Amino acid sequence: MVRLSKRSFQILALSSVAVFLPLKIMAQGNLIDAPLPHSTGQSVSPSFEGWYSNSDGGFSLVFGYFNRNYEENISLPIGLNNKFEPGPADRGQPTYFHPRRHTGVFAVRVPANFGNQKLTWRITAGNESIAIPGHLKPEWEITALEEITSGNTPPAVRFSESGNSGQGPLGISSPTITTNVGEAAEILLWSKDDGVKKSRAAGQRPRTGVVVSKFRGPGDVVIDDDTPRLVGEKASIKATFTLAGDYILRVLAWDDSGGQSAVMAGGFFCCWTNGFINVRVDE
């Protein structure tokens, strides 16, 4: 997720190899231990994926992360261990980090006069503090809203049948849904794709899908089906929350480009959309 005019940004895969015995590898003439995979206790690296222009003249800085743990989900509330600099510390980033690499998880709007400024995301976990700056350097421009070679665009996501829709990493947020602890809240969403095929054989319909996951919140979230089937453009899930408080669920809507793993495997930085479901949970 270099630049020749406007072009799609290439994502480099972060692949992981299971290692069961310490291996020795050569590095500058010395033997060193290859890193071993860990289930828990490791750090989380923020990642800057690039930037794209918005229709209002401003820009979106796109971020993701890499949780080095293979099993541990990490909660980091906004504050000292999860903040943007300069402030405000809260720029819409996740506070719940799923294992391994996640690309283009959210975007931050910056104004047209942002210029040479930087917006740095810092995460402290696993005894490491890691920061990454977001910026508008020309070579980091991405075409997140259209895959140039095919004309493919991201799915449009909305949270009511006739409501406003969003596309791309910046996405769209839902009105706040209210529920109670332990009750299964039904959540509806709609996803519509442009139907452009990238690499399918003639006559095959493009694939589309959505994935729903926890993005923020104080307690656990149980989702009855985190990859609900779209019936037409509509999907439904039921989510149950274990503690009172404010939550956000992330909807990842993907199209013929494939799910996020396919994008991470080296595809263009297009085409998927983020949706954010706001939920208020009472006792």
Image (cartoon, grey):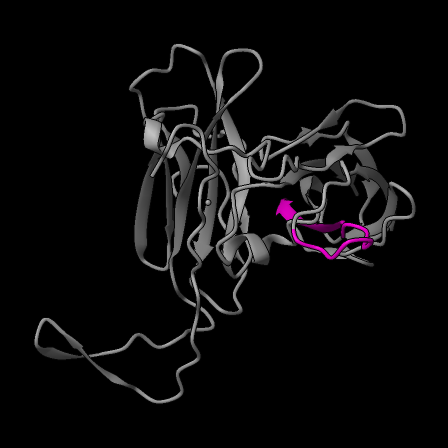
- The image quarter containing residue 133 is top left
Question: Which residue appears farthest toward the bottom when viewing the image?
Answer: 21
* Rendering coords of residue 239 (x, y %): 81, 51
Left or right of 215 in this view: 76: left
Question: Does the magenta-highlighted stretch encompass residue 158?
Answer: no
Name the residue located 87 percent from the left edge and 51 percent from the top edge. Answer: 184
Report the front residue among 7 and 12.
Answer: 7
Q: In this view, does 232 lie above or below 204?
A: above
Seen from the viewer's position, the closer of residues 54 and 224 is: 54
Q: Quadrant of residue 43?
A: bottom left
Displayed quadrant of residue 141: top left
Q: Name the residue: 74% across, 57% down.
A: 201
**Does residue 200 show up magenta in the picture?**
yes
Q: In this view, does 269 lie above or below 225?
A: above
Question: Start and end of the magenta stretch?
Answer: 199-217
Residue 113 in sight from this viewpoint: yes
Farthest-out residue, front: 202
Q: Between residues 238 and 161, which one lies in front from this camera angle?
A: 161
Identified at 55% across, 37% down, the residue is: 106
Residue 3 percent location from the top left of the image? 36, 35
The residue shown at (80%, 48%) is 181
Q: Quadrant of the C terminus?
A: top right
The reply to whether residue 94 is in sight is no
Where's residue 219, x and y in %? 66, 51
- All told, the count of numbered labels is 0
Residue 143 image offset from top left, x and y in percent: 51, 32
Outermost residue, left side: 29
